[in-house]
Image: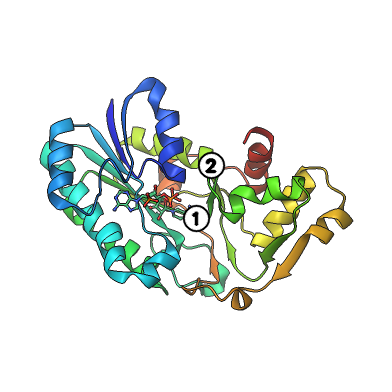
Amino acid sequence: MKILITGAAGLVGSHLARRLAPENYVLELTHGDLDIADCSAVRRRVLHENPELVINCAVLQVDESEQEPARAQAVNVDGPRFLAEAAREIGAEIVHFSTQYAFDGEPAGRLPYTIEDDPRPVNHYGRTKVAGEAAVRAACPRSYIVRTSWVYGSGKNSFLCTVADDLKAGKTVRVIDDIWSSTTYVADLIERVMAIGATGRYGTYHVVNAGVCTYYEFALEAGRLLGLPRDRIDSLVEITHESDMKRIAVRPRYTPLRCLMSEQLGLPPMRDWRAALAAYVRNG
Ligand SMILES: NC(=O)c1ccc[n+]([C@@H]2O[C@H](COP(=O)([O-])OP(=O)(O)OC[C@H]3O[C@@H](n4cnc5c(N)ncnc54)[C@H](OP(=O)(O)O)[C@@H]3O)[C@@H](O)[C@H]2O)c1
């Protein structure tokens, strides 16, 4: 299959490209290769390459979106629409990633969010990601929207990606203990996206590992998996609260996800976050 990936230097894009390359012809387009916010460049490139599948992994991240709303609109809404329009023009499918930040973090009864819950984002990133989903759905009927949450894997400098290495190296880590969500090992995300793609059932999916945790619980589990004694972990893990972090964009407090589409398709539940983290600690 000929597959065109945008944002291919990022966490999800780089892992996807590596995983798909052996069995497919994969065009890995980094930001430098293709700016998805450039309408004519997108159309020209997609029509020229004529892939069967477009996978959009480009994104403007959370705090940057708050600081630069016009750029967030361009990268998170307009760019996905340009890609979806071009995909439709050539009869291709499109996979577009979205986020648990579609939701406000105050679910009734603390139940995981499903696609039946109305999006109610609390920050600009979330608002643009929800608008980007709608733009892709409207532009291309052959679209998969994949909402995921707190993704980690090798190669990115983010808390979830580096905490195990930091603890192993004896570095102190500051962790938030009052925000909860689903976590997602990038290898598991990719396997499930491939399984979904094989079904041909277009729609909106929630792809995360089972269970819910805080960053603090994630750090404790990483330390435990590394075989560190509890008092050593406690000496390295400094607890903090979301409000103390003074981050630019507000974060929703409680956003675990559940995938009704996968359940309807009979896809098995994804493994528990602890088992996924164990695989990451073991394999990277
Ligand atoms: N990581 C998570 O925890 C998480 C959670 C929920 C949902 N998601 C979703 O998963 C998807 C992938 O996220 P990720 O974590 O892989 O992001 P990432 O690591 O930040 O990578 C995003 C990539 O997009 C590129 N990019 C930015 N603007 C672009 C543009 N105008 N044209 C082309 N490329 C552009 C960036 O390149 P430059 O850096 O050079 O600009 C970067 O390489 C996104 O849709 C995101 O919303 C991720």
- Residue 18: give x, y in percent of width and height: 44, 30
Q: Is the C terminus in the top left, top right, bottom left or bottom right quadrant?
A: top right
Q: Which element is circle 2 on?
A: loop
> Residue most toward the front?
32
Q: Is residue 178 above or below residue 208?
A: below
Q: Disc 2 and disc 1: Cα gap in Å?
A: 17 Å
Mark 2 C-beta to ligand 1 under 8 Å? no
Q: Is residue 257 above or below residue 184?
A: below
Indicate how the structure is coloured in the image: rainbow
Between 6 and 112, which is closer to the camera in this rendering?
Answer: 6
In the image: residue 258, left or right of residue 168: left
- Residue 15: give x, y in percent of width and height: 46, 36
In the image: residue 243, left or right of residue 196: right
Q: Is the N terminus in the top left, top right, bottom left or bottom right quadrant?
A: top left
Residue under the point 12% across and 40% down: 44
Given the image, on which type of amino acid does mark 1 rest? Ser
Q: Earlier in the sequence, mark 2 or mark 1?
A: 1
Residue under the point 18% across and 42% down: 87
Given the image, on which type of amino acid does mark 2 rest? Gly
- How many other residues sit within 10 Å of disc 1, few (<14), some (14-19) or many (≥20)? many
Mark 1 C-beta to ligand 1 under 8 Å? yes
Mark 2 or 1: the one toward you: 2
Residue 140 visible (yes or no) = no
Say which residue label 2 marks: 155
Between 205 and 263, which is closer to the camera in this rendering?
Answer: 205
Say which residue label 1 marks: 149
- Residue 28: give x, y in percent of width and height: 33, 34
